Image (tube, grey):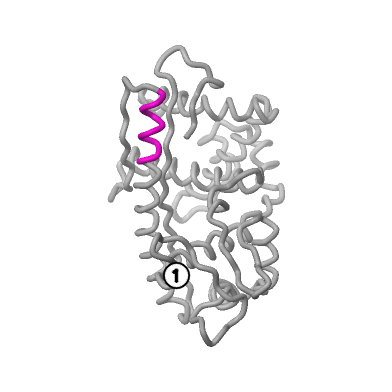
């Protein structure tokens, strides 16, 4: 029996697609390119997540589930998977998280203190010790070079490494912005999809929403939101780092990940165009 799609779900997906369409037009991705991406996503999800227990997945079943023609299913399944591009970005993000989670590495205002590049008798933690705790695959020097190249840290003449606070917000590196865009939006939609499907327990997904404000009001509220968000992120980050450190010496790596994030958005409530939107 065909599944009857609730009209509310159709409307919700159409609404979510509008900023995606805006992004695609901005970067020259037309409907045909996006359609090919959607085919790939449909085939991938159907192949990996909608198998019949005890049976191998077939091209015909995938075509039935997705509406993608069988010849396209075969073509998509036969092409090489995309190479992972976020490995080093993930290591850099984890290094920053570790640095900010160690109380003795922060000053009275919560700002990061400089640390020595290599182990030093006067310092409990060094850049090298943090890097070695994160990975054995990449040499600490290579990771430092990447951080310096991205403007995340600077190395001074006294061999001290300084974390540049301004770098914690992605600036002009489009690849970095795109990487975190894909991770953040993917996981937020995945959490919302989990909740819409009625899965238990539901994931945290809360928001504050108001109309009837001036542009000046939104700027003041945005500043308050940033402060509240940073406090929440630090609390969750510190807990995650605490538990991760307990597993460093274990032979089997734990399988779960978490993603906790915040955002703030403001725009005109009626008659606005995308270029009039205020993103803060």
Q: Position of residue 103 (x, y in %)?
A: 40, 70
**Foreground pick, 228 / 42:** 228
Most common SS among magenta residues: helix
Q: Nearer the viewer, residue 192 or 205?
A: 205
Question: Which of 252 and 244 lies nearest the eye of the viewer?
Answer: 244
Few, some or many residues within 10 Å of mark 1 (<14, 14–19, 20+): few
Q: Look at 70% across and 41% down and name the residue there.
A: 75
The magenta segment is 215-224
Seen from the viewer's position, the closer of residues 91 and 116 is 116
Q: Secondary structure at mark 1?
A: loop
Work out whether 278 lies above or below 80: above
Asked if 41 appears above or below 154 in the picture, the reply is: above
**In the image, is residue 69 above or below residue 238?**
above
Task: Find out whether residue 222 is within the magenta segment.
Answer: yes
* Number of numbered labels in the structure image: 1
In which quadrant will I find the N terminus? top left
Q: Residue furthest top?
A: 271
Tell me where residue 165 appears, x and y as whole percent.
Answer: 53, 55
In the picture of the structure, the residue carrying the numbered disc 1 is 254
> Does the magenta segment cover residue 89?
no
Furthest-left residue in this view: 201
Q: What percent of the width, then of the height, locates residue 196?
A: 34, 37
Does 190 sit left or right of 166 as displayed? Answer: left
Quarter-of-image position of residue 31 = top right
Q: Residue, x 68% and y 72% (percent of image)? A: 157
Q: From the viewer's perspective, is residue 32 above or below residue 44?
A: above
Q: Position of residue 184 (x, y in %)?
A: 49, 45
Location of residue 263 (image quadrant)? top left
């Amino acid at each position: 029996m065909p599944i009857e799609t609730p009209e509310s779900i159709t409307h919700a997906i159409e609404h979510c697609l509008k900023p995606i369409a805006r992004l695609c037009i901005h970067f020259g991705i037309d409907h045909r390119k996006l359609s090919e991406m959607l085919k790939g996503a449909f085939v991938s999800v159907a192949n990996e997540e909608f198998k019949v227990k005890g049976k191998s997945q077939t091209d015909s079943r995938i075509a039935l589930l997705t509406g993608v023609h069988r010849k396209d299913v075969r073509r998509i399944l036969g092409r090489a998977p995309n190479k992972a591009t976020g490995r080093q970005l993930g290591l850099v993000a984890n290094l920053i998280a570790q640095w900010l989670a160690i109380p003795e590495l922060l000053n009275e205002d919560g700002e990061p203190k400089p640390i020595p590049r290599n182990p030093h008798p006067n310092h409990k933690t060094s850049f090298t010790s943090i890097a070695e705790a994160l990975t054995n695959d990449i040499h600490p020097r290579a990771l430092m070079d990447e951080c310096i190249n991205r403007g995340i840290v600077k190395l001074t003449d006294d061999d001290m490494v300084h974390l540049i606070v301004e770098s914690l917000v992605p600036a002009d590196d489009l690849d970095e912005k795109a990487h975190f865009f894909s991770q953040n939006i993917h996981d937020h939609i995945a959490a919302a999809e989990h909740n819409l499907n009625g899965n238990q327990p539901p994931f945290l997904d809360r928001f504050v929403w108001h109309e009837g404000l001036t542009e000046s009001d939104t700027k003041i509220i945005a500043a308050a939101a940033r402060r509240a968000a940073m406090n929440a992120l630090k609390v969750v980050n510190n807990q995650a780092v605490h538990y991760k450190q307990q597993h460093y010496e274990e032979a089997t790596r734990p399988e779960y990940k978490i993603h906790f994030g915040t955002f703030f958005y403001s725009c005109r409530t009626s008659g606005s165009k995308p270029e009039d939107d205020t993103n803060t």
